[in-house]
Image (spheres, coloured by chain):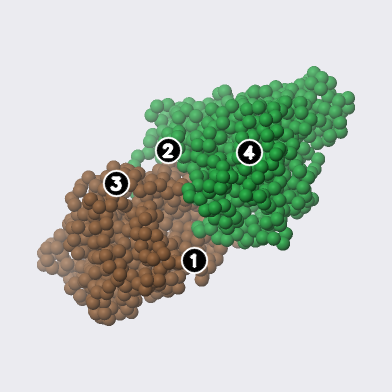
Chain colours: A brown, B green
Amino acid sequence: MTQHVTLTGAAASSTLPDAGTRAHARLARPVVPAGTHRGAGLGEVRLTGGFWGRLQETNAAATLDHCLAWMERLGWVENFDRVAQGTTGGHRPGWQFSDSEVYKLVEALAWEHGRTGDARVEAMLGGLVDRIAAAQDADGYLNTCYGHAGQPGRYTDLERGHELYCTGHLLQAAVARVRTVGEDLLVAVARRAADEVCREFGAGAREGLCGHPEIEVGLAELGRALDEPRYTEQARLFVERRGRGTLGPIPLLSPAYFQDDVPVREADVWRGHAVRALYLAAGAADVAVDTGDDELLAAVERQWSRSVERRTFLTGGMGSRHQDEGFGDDFELSPDRAYCETCAGVASVMVSWRLYLATGEVRYADLMERTFYNVVATSPRTDGRAFFYANPLQQRVAGADVRPDAENPRAEGGVRAPWFDVSCCPTNVARTLATWHLYAVSVDGDTVTLVQHAAGDVRVVLDDGGELALTVRTGYPRTGDVAVEVTGAPDRPVTLRMRVPHWADGARLTDPDGTAGPAAPGWAEVTRTFAAGDEVVLRLPVAPRLTWPDPRVDAVRGTVAVERGPLVLCLESVDLPAGVELEDVRLDVAAPLADDDDGARARGLALPPTGDGTGRPPFAAGPPNPGAGEPVELRLVPYQRWAERGPSTMRVFVPTA
Amino acid sequence: MTQHVTLTGAAASSTLPDAGTRAHARLARPVVPAGTHRGAGLGEVRLTGGFWGRLQETNAAATLDHCLAWMERLGWVENFDRVAQGTTGGHRPGWQFSDSEVYKLVEALAWEHGRTGDARVEAMLGGLVDRIAAAQDADGYLNTCYGHAGQPGRYTDLERGHELYCTGHLLQAAVARVRTVGEDLLVAVARRAADEVCREFGAGAREGLCGHPEIEVGLAELGRALDEPRYTEQARLFVERRGRGTLGPIPLLSPAYFQDDVPVREADVWRGHAVRALYLAAGAADVAVDTGDDELLAAVERQWSRSVERRTFLTGGMGSRHQDEGFGDDFELSPDRAYCETCAGVASVMVSWRLYLATGEVRYADLMERTFYNVVATSPRTDGRAFFYANPLQQRVAGADVRPDAENPRAEGGVRAPWFDVSCCPTNVARTLATWHLYAVSVDGDTVTLVQHAAGDVRVVLDDGGELALTVRTGYPRTGDVAVEVTGAPDRPVTLRMRVPHWADGARLTDPDGTAGPAAPGWAEVTRTFAAGDEVVLRLPVAPRLTWPDPRVDAVRGTVAVERGPLVLCLESVDLPAGVELEDVRLDVAAPLADDDDGARARGLALPPTGDGTGRPPFAAGPPNPGAGEPVELRLVPYQRWAERGPSTMRVFVPTA
């Protein structure tokens, strides 16, 4: 039923030099569409500390091991062994989609190994890939929950089975591998799995779909990585098939839950399960770009616009509803029940990156920054060993301590947990952090763009030949100065382009001559024949600022948020004076905000507590008359760090005084 | 496995005279606790038209048949036949709890027959009871989903199986029967079922619980009705057993979902699934009263207070979350995602009525009025053939048309539907409307209390002998005058007591001498030796009024609601001028409200639509500056009637200008 490919041993045992010095991996990156913009490759960017560098190091040092240990402990890896050994049947640990967590970890390991060449990481990966490969059926089918003795048959529950979803993650992991080391065992496994999918679901074969999109993006990128147009075509088929009521009903959920209600190219907005909607959009964008389908690309862009403008939280988080982990109606954005699944943040970044590469529009990069800082970076605890699954913008009741040795409920808690019953987020964070730097820089002809701002070294291959080498020095987002020193440049005019975030009114750019000028939100650029030692400095005003809700967002009327640079701030109960309850605090918007490290201080008012005892619902015959209240200094901290100091109540939107 | 009891034929064929003339049924009522306050019996109150009289007539004329037709069509009644015939196994239509819908319909039919003596209703009931009885196992077990050939074994899934829940509804139906006609086949069936439960789950036997409370309230009332202390004791055991982690986990839900987290007498607030929490509280109140357990009664009162003051919507609706149909955290009261299940409204009334009878406190009657008018009466369409399952206070997107011939999704829609996949609400509405008048009047010694105001005839047996007969004339709630004419009275001083709702500031009472005086919220009473022809008039100010949210209710800050008498009003898109969107409307609280039939007119402002195109989430660097706007007259209508004129958008809380 299963077979080994001889490549394994070599790949598993080889210690690779640092990616930056290997020709093969130098341009390795997750998304390689047709078109002029390309993201920087593994060998072209290196973070040197800073906000994201630290997250990336913690991911490498803690999260990867953490995920592997949990999946070993829970038997999710052993599920592969049982298929290989023919001992399936009886209790199988994990949800039907647990294979995908193993694949996402493999993907994270592959990118991490590509980034650093770490032999220990390569050994972890090799061990997993051997066990995965051993579980593959002779015809390429690979799943530990279906199709073997004592299990339901293959593809017998397309609505809920997640088989193609799992395969999609396998393919994404293989993409990481083929781009960092070339064709190894994992890639061979993925090829065979993709071929099986094409045979089973190709044109003229089974007109099926997976309840959870993901196979589309996996096939599309593997098609690019292996130059296999058949895979792209199969991705296209899956995208086109969707929205036509192909999937059967799931009790209590509508076809919109898995986007089978409206064809992708006809839809105007994302709806239903957020991660599904966004993975599908990412796959559709890939297909659109690779097939030159401008109508489809325009549809994804249209959906992005409406969904961002009407169904997205201040943090960039998506998903307003717990019930179906889904988008809500337009402007249904309650902070307390915000779902904002971490995985939806990851998926949103996947979509925006594809649209940025396809169009070069700054709005996509702006949303990526918002989502990176306030969703993706919010999930992992500082030690990289606990995570938020949901990311609400208000916590009314301080969370209870989590169970350190058991799977925790995923979406209620207010405390980061080591692992969840449904544990998709930790591995999604891991694979994203391992590649974060690859979303920070893009290249288009002789233009090099700093899409995200982070301290690091950049040395990109220009499309027209030669290299541009830069050293970026910045304390961003704590400080707003981004200094870019040119350390190497071709002997012709090239363009250095830097993103000025939409919130950065008053930004200024200083060119190598020392000439400073205003830099409006959008792109600031300098074109010249650079010499080593030239410096360009972008000064972004990161001082705390008030942010007001659109009047159509009912749930936060009469409140204001405080942001600082790209960081959404919040008020946590642990920062309030003794005796003051979060629900009684008001913010005085007339008073200036003060900078406070990476947070802010604001003038507030602590109102007298409102009493109970009416015996009636909390509504009254007259307008609220809270009395004078006591002045109180409010300390606001980055939302991204909340609940790091123990369970607390929290709110991003504070009622105005 | 099953047997018939010979009583059937007689009971099913007898045509009973009107309840009011039958000694047996005259005092028949749903809840008969120990204590001094008692509710009026079937023969003591009769509605004569009016708001509730019309609903009751529609229930009789349309809803009962409607429910039976759907349950026949879907095979939910036939499930009983298949058990009787020994043909179980294979596909069984309906959820595992569909038996309970049949029982609730039987209960409604029993009360309706008791109210009117209608032979057709009796025949419907008899036909159902025959089929139910035929499905009972020899040892009393009765369930169509478990315990027979091809089915899971009895009590093998206490968490989700709903077996005892179904039995509880059977017992409630039998209570209606024993009180209206005496011991018939249904009562015999219920006795045997209750005995089986006592044997199986009694002290020293299985320490089990049902995931969905209901058996408690069924056993307690059947114990009262049949003077069987064993049943009361079994109810007490179930109440005491709960909250100790007896039930196993349900994936993705916490033990609070079915109130197995905290013992009933220790809990401070209702939490988890709202209907479960409230049915349990009703059963606990029964047990507390019957066993003289003041601590337990105080616990239920405490839970009522905190839950009403912090977790209850303006409509009286309970349940803030769709995911678990449950209560949310304190002050988590978003109007758009308000669940406010119709059944939770019914259950809330059940609890409040028990607490009113136990304590005589007016707050319980006030909440009942709020819930009756704005939840229970909101569910059924005017024709009694379609229902709301959930009752949100804001509809952002006009609902789509429902499927007239298929089960509809229960909680998303914005349009009343004929039937649901989970269809607990129609039968719950039916049994409540059939008995509504029995919650309108109570008796305590020589005091007769008009708890709810409705046109009708009252002729109550006083505890100290004699009768007080009254004719109530009122257009309430459209008009606020309630005129009570005494048509018969004993020759001694007795007290007529009328409820002055908490919102009725400025109410006045005129006594039989024509002397008028202020009547403060609470109770207004006249004690005297009444003579036929005496009239007492209570004048309640029902003019439209503004109602303001407690500042702790974040979701509706900056808004106001309009109420009129007991009716919560709402703004529906169908009442807006062409071109004005509901989201752009503001209400001018400085302008007077005008009366408009049973609604109101208010001065409003239509703001210019807010545009999109930012490419960013709906938050901005400056406070909203909507511009001047156009004056617009706003017509507000009773929330209870919304969506009667086709799909619409709707809001109860309107932002202030």
Label ID, residue A264: 3
Mark 3 touches mark 2? (CB < 8 Å): no
Front of the two marks 1 and 4 = 4
Of all chains, the one bearing label 2 is B
Amino acid under disc 3: Val
How much space separates mark 1 and mark 2, taking CA atoms? Answer: 38 Å
* Quarter of the rendering containing residue B366: top right
In the image shown, does B335 or B124 lie closer to the viewer? B124
Chain letter for the residue marked with disc 1 in the picture: A
What's the amino acid at mark 1?
A: Glu
- What is the distance, in whole Å, between disc 4 and disc 3 at their CAs? 54 Å
Q: Are marks 1 and 4 on the same chain?
A: no
Q: Which mark is residue B397?
A: 2
* Along the viewing direction, whichever of B554 and A420 lies nearer the viewer: A420
Residue B130 is marked as 4
Which secondary structure lies at badge 4?
helix
